[in-house]
Image (spheres, rainbow, N blue to C red):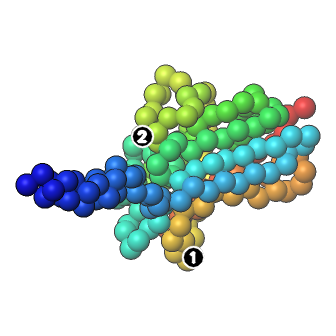
Amino acid sequence: MRRAVLALALLATPLLAQEATPVPRVAISPRGAEEIAVGPGRMRVEYGRPFAKGRKIFGELVPWGKVWRTGANEATSLTTDVDVTLGNVALPKGSYTLYTLPGEKEWLLIVNRQTGQWGTEYDPKLDLARIPMKSAARPDLLEVMTISFLPEDAFRGTLRISWEKRTLSVPYAWRK
């Protein structure tokens, strides 16, 4: 009997060890980053890149009139090591979280002082600014959400968010 218990324990040990070993997880929405030189410094955005997967995005998955985390998973971050203007707002160098407030006619980019949180953890008391964005229809369907910088020159350009059949943009510029 004792040998049978010992044999079972030896057989079970590898199975128990497998249970205790964490299974690596692949993010369904991979992280993305975009960085650009602005004057003598740099600006960087890091965000989760969700896929449309045949879903209607704006007005359904991302409802009108409710703050959206602007991506997936961890909150979307903006870091700048120089003072910039984003839209019409003076933004001091530092780290921020970006949210958006989608509307059928108007979109707002929300710059929030809270950083390092999960994307759905939003505290409106920490908003630094709400900046109007230009919203335009895309002629094609963009499957994966993308945030990009489109430079005009070494000092200014456009921050652009594109997904599904929509492109949103706001100008940025280095502040001396």
Residue found 53% across the figure and 53% down from its top? 48
Q: Is residue 22 visible?
A: yes
Find residue 105 and report its horizontal and vertical position in percent.
48, 53
| Image quadrant in which the N terminus is located | bottom left
| Residue bearing mark 2 | 120
Residue 38 rendering spot, x and y as whole percentages = 85, 45
Name the residue located 19 percent from the left edge and 53 percent from the top edge: 6
Q: Element type at marker 2?
A: loop
Which of the two labelled residues, at mark 1 and mark 2, occupies the earlier sequence position?
2
Q: Is residue 110 above or below residue 71?
A: above
Residue situated in front as seen by the camera: 20 or 73: 20
| 112 in relation to 147, above or below | above
Q: Secondary structure at mark 1?
A: strand
Question: Which is more toward the observer, 107 or 175?
Answer: 175
Residue visible at 54% across and 71% down? 142
Which residue is labeled 1 in the image? 139
Q: Position of residue 8 (x, y in %)?
A: 18, 58
Instruction: Say if 167 sits above or below 78 in the image.
Output: below
User: In the visual, does 43 lie left or right of 115?
Assistant: right
In the displayed structure, does residue 117 sit left or right of residue 152? left
- Judge the density around disc 1: few (<14), some (14-19), many (≥20) Cα neighbours within 10 Å: few
Q: Residue furthest left?
A: 1
- The picture quadrant where one finds residue 78 is top right
The quadrant of the rendering that contains the C terminus is: top right
The mark tally for this picture is 2
Amino acid at pointer 2: Thr
Single out the mark in the foreground, 1 or 2.
2
Q: Looking at numbered disc 1 in the image, what kind of residue is underneath it?
A: Pro
